[in-house]
Amino acid sequence: LPVVAIVGRPNVGKSTLFNRLVGKKLALVDDRPGVTRDRREGDATLLGVEFRVIDTAGFEDDDPDTLPGRMRRQTEAAVETADVALFLIDARAGVMPLDEEIARWLRGGNTPVVVLANKAEGRAGESGVLESFGLGFGDPVPFSAEHGEGLADLFTALLPYVDRDEEDFEEEIEEDEEGRPTGPLKLAIVGRPNAGKSTLVNRMLGEERMITGPEAGITRDSIAIDWEWTDKDGNVRPVRLIDTAGMRKRARVQDKLEKLSVADALHAVDFAEVVVLLLDATLGLEAQDLRIADKVLQEGRALIIALNKWDVADNPPALFQGIRTALDEGLAQVKGLPLLTVSAVTGRGIDQLIEAAFETREAWSKRISTGQLNRWFEKAIEKNPPPAPGGRRIKLRYLTQAKTRPPGFILFGTRVDELPESYRRYLVNGIRRDLGFGAVPVRLTMRAPKN
Ligand code: GDP
């Protein structure tokens, strides 16, 4: 089982929290001589996810203002072996010197830390919650161990560390204070042969930087080109263009390359955050384009459609509208994908395309607070209550964002397996439309808590 270690200075509520999480299953597992109190461990189940909890209160001695060596060594050992440390603060008392001391040694270790601002029932302890931001472990979770308030937020904060299924979601990415990604935008341009991919890439990079060969190989079939793009405000922003073999080859045997381009597209997609599907506007949207788009979305990548050769487009407004409609009908699961027009030859629209790619990546990487999410969720289910198959209403409890890139949500409730697809789609579309996720693929999984 994944292990959660509860740490914090005396009297912040560690044992109350432990008892609340472990309940009756409380177990005394270590009563070696020399340990002041018993080391307390127990198994907890929070909304269907099981983990082991260690309460380091057992290591404390009676003097509340010191961290004696023995307690410290045992606490350290517990924290080092844990998957996550749950660092308790007394929100009413605020951040005390001893809290800061504990924070310092936690920062020195490798165990991820979630700050839990306890005793924050009702509106109490708001300033303490704010103060605990300053400890440097990200957003504190307001909580009341005594009243059991904040369990949903605690669950959301712990989920990445305790749910083995979600483990592969953990990925190091560079971001600014607001959580926006700052690393190079990993962009792939895919599309059928002759859509104008090579022309576009060369235009983006500037004529003097023609693609010559796979110097910076990621794999045999894909290369990455790092370059810098200057936005309209003059900010220089790094871009990593994922180039595929298909971009460098020329169409000879049309049929063979048609196949190759789909495989290439998928290969590039593996390395990309945002994928631009480039279409030859004069040819319109074809089944193969929809297949590529669908695969990109299935892979969870953010997708932008760009209509190339707009310089030679006939009746542009009608053409645009026709493709817009075909796209929304062909990809019903994600209506309203960004649709832009460009000319790789004249350069028109390319800056807007790159700008849109950065914006789309932001939405794709966005994290929304459980509070905001559930305020939205309550209204959404009030406006359109879930159905009642067999006369019994499906009860939906709450929603949590379990991951980003792409955004993934978990919906908790009873009999969620009976929820019709149309209702699931209602929620997904609402999340996209109302919470700023735009047209990025949003995943929603259902879970029925066991307890
Ligand atoms: P790729 O197979 O997708 O890499 O396509 P290419 O970049 O080789 O372009 C195919 C053809 O379309 C070439 O003859 C290009 O000159 C032409 N082309 C590409 N972009 C544009 C554009 O924006 N406008 C026009 N008029 N022609 C373009």
Image (spheres, helix red, strand yellow):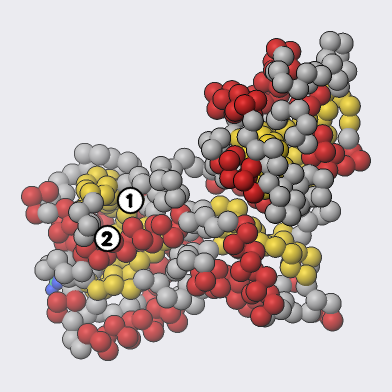
Instruction: Report the residue at 34% width, 50% height from top.
Output: 186
> Which residue is pictured at 83% across the width and 28% down the height?
40
Depicted 136 relative to depicted 435: above or below: above
The location of residue 356, given as percent across then percent down, is 32, 64
Q: CA distance from mark 1 to mark 2?
A: 9 Å
> Which is nearer the eye, 335 or 47?
47
What percent of the width, then of the height, locates residue 330? Answer: 44, 78
Q: x%, y% of residue 185?
A: 33, 51
Tag 2 residue? 354
The residue that disc 1 covers is: 185
The quadrant in which residue 145 appears is top right
Looking at the image, in which quadrant does ligand 1 appear?
A: bottom left
Residue type at numbered disc 1? Leu
Rendered image: mark on residue 420: none
- Residue 161 visible at all: no
Q: Is residue 406 above or below residue 69?
A: below
